[in-house]
Image (cartoon, grey):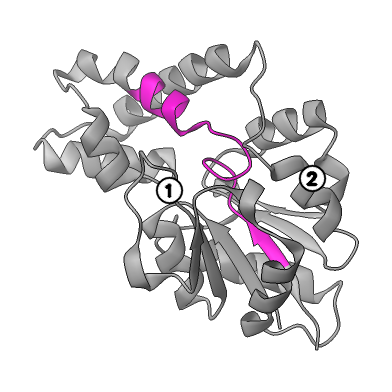
Amino acid sequence: MSRAIVFDFDGVIVDTEPLHFAAFREVLPALGITLSREAYFSRYLGMSDEEILRRVLSDHEVRLLPEEACGLLRNKDVAYRQLIEPGIDLASGVEALVRRASRRWPLAICSGSKRVEIERILRRAGLLAFFPVVVTTEDVPASKPDPAGYALAIARLQERVPGLMPDGCLAIEDSEAGITAAKQAGMRTLQVCPGELPPAGSASDATVSSLAELTDARLGTLLA
């Protein structure tokens, strides 16, 4: 049967979540909001910038005009891109896993980040060519936990892989929002749970603390 792997990006391919958090911490005080690390990683992890801002504003009972929200998100983009400009290391085990897995299965990315950010990092790492399908926040009307991104990634993979079905696709995620989205899209799931991130518990089909510990045998079992 046809199989494929879809990777989340932030927190899975690269450990950029602390940088997204730092960028929001830089711009939100202009609204009188101080975003705590605990709140970011427990409530907003895995969502697009737009969804994070919407929820933060709701949680703090702050209202913005659409143009004000757009301006704040632009400032957040500037802050984040300055943080990644010097370069950022891939998460442990990712490069070896991508190169091995690509020999057996087609790979894709489904992320709430922007395409320019994803492609810049993958190109620098020499991994962009391994991901012929990349779905970003610009491609869908709603971010995780909505399944729209994963549904689109599966549809684009199906154009390349005859007979591929959602339950033949494995989503590799770090956030509860991402696991929920993948499950709703009908996928199998593997959650990467470093010590600082809250695991989704039994929601995911399997968990690892790092992709460095994901053996070919276990990956094959997850895709069997």
As rendered, which of 128 and 170 lies closer to the eye? 170
Residue located 38% across and 42% down the image: 195
Image location of residue 209, percent across then percent down: 49, 50
Magenta segment, which residues?
A: 5-24
Q: Quadrant of the C terminus?
A: bottom right
Image location of residue 215, percent across then percent down: 70, 60
Q: Are marks 1 and 2 in contact (CB under 8 Å)?
A: no
Numbered label attached to residue 72: none
As rendered, which of 64 and 90 lies closer to the eye? 90
Give the mark nearest the N terminus, 1 or 2: 1
The part of the image, by quadrant, that contains residue 86 is top right
- The kind of residue on which mark 2 rests is Ala
Q: What is the distance, in whole Å, between disc 1 and disc 2 at their CAs?
A: 24 Å
Rendered position, 62 above or below 27: below
Image location of residue 78, percent across then percent down: 51, 16
Numbered label attached to residue 46: 1
Q: Quadrant of the N terminus?
A: bottom right
As rendered, which of 23 and 130 lies closer to the eye? 130
Secondary structure category for the residue under label 2: helix
Q: How many marks?
A: 2
Residue at the extreme left of the image, as rendered: 61
Numbered label attached to residue 96: 2
Image location of residue 88, percent across then percent down: 64, 22
